Image: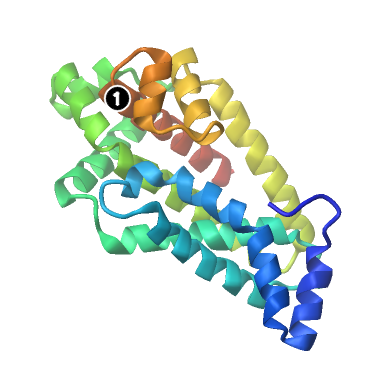
Amino acid sequence: MAAAGYDVTAAIREYRETQDINLRNDIILRYLDLVRLLAMSLRNVYIKYASPDDIINEGVIALISAIDTFDLDRGVKFETYANIKIKGAIVDFVRKQDWIPRKVRSFGRELDSAYNELFGKLGRHPKNSELASHMGLSRDELEKRMAESAGAVTLSFEELLYEDNFEVMNSEDSADAALYEAELKKVIAEAIENLSPQARQVVTLYYYERLKFNEIAKVLGITESRVSQIHSKAMLFLKHELTEYMQR
């Protein structure tokens, strides 16, 4: 991300006034790390089907669009606006490629529905054994399919996060957008703290340390399939908490 003290609003204003392509390229270079970080956050969704460079290219195109469309007078941070634009473009690109097999995507939707139904009945987040019984599966089969559907569940969570962020960012009230951003970070942080210790480790290593599933497996001394299954369950938990917050 851009170094402290860099006035990106002034830089964008100057670029628009002069149309000096070198000014735009300088902004792009300063925010290229943001593009890379956002591309990394979805790597386990696309890694079997596309190179990170393909995803980063999509992110750079979105960054250019953010530079061109950012409202200089609304009082919203450029970093916030660019983050939403870039993440949205990557999510949309991945979704449109339809890389995730239909069977896996379908199971992801069924799993999400079962999770929410059980939560409604139990008043708490369901255990794997309860999910398995509800879906007519053995626990081993459920956890195997949860591992396989980790990419689909992650994409579903990211879609929810992006779509609501986009709606708020496009509201007329910039103060509301800033407040929402702060509240959303707090809600997600609190939800992560409420995960089991192992699930919290997986999510932290994935999103904050930017490790791949196979790297997380080595750190925790478990199989990559187990990491995928834990991550999938954690995404269901976080998505439910986020949906509850959005519906208040």
- For image coordinates 49% across by 20% down, the residue present is 201
Q: Nearer the viewer, residue 218 or 97?
A: 218
Q: Is residue 195 left or right of residue 101?
A: right
Q: Nearer the viewer, residue 173 or 16?
A: 16
Is 52 drawn above or below residue 150 in the view shown?
below
Residue 49 position in % (x across, y down)? 26, 52
Mark 1, secondary structure of its residue: helix
Q: Nearer the viewer, residue 36 or 177?
A: 36
Is 150 drawn above or below residue 50 in the view shown?
above
Q: How many marks?
A: 1
Determine the residue located farthest toward the front in the rendered image. 22
Mark 1 surroundings: few (<14), some (14-19) or many (≥20) residues within 10 A: some
Looking at the rendering, which quadrant does residue 172 occupy? bottom right
Q: Is residue 34 left or right of residue 19?
A: left
Query: What is the basis of the colouring in this image?
Result: rainbow
Q: Is residue 125 left or right of residue 205?
A: left
Mark 1 = which residue? Answer: 224
Amino acid type for the residue under numbered disc 1: Glu
Residue 63 makes an appearance in the image: yes
Q: Is residue 133 left or right of residue 235?
A: left
Residue 171 makes an appearance in the image: no
Residue 188 position in % (x across, y down)? 58, 35
Determine the residue located farthest toward the right in the rendered image. 5
Residue 3 position in % (x across, y down)? 77, 51
- For image coordinates 64% across by 66% down, the residue present is 28
Looking at the rendering, which quadrant does residue 113 occupy? top left
- For image coordinates 40% across by 62% down, the residue present is 92
Quarter of the figure with the C terminus: top right
Residue 234 position in % (x across, y down)? 42, 28
- For image coordinates 79% across by 86% down, the residue present is 17
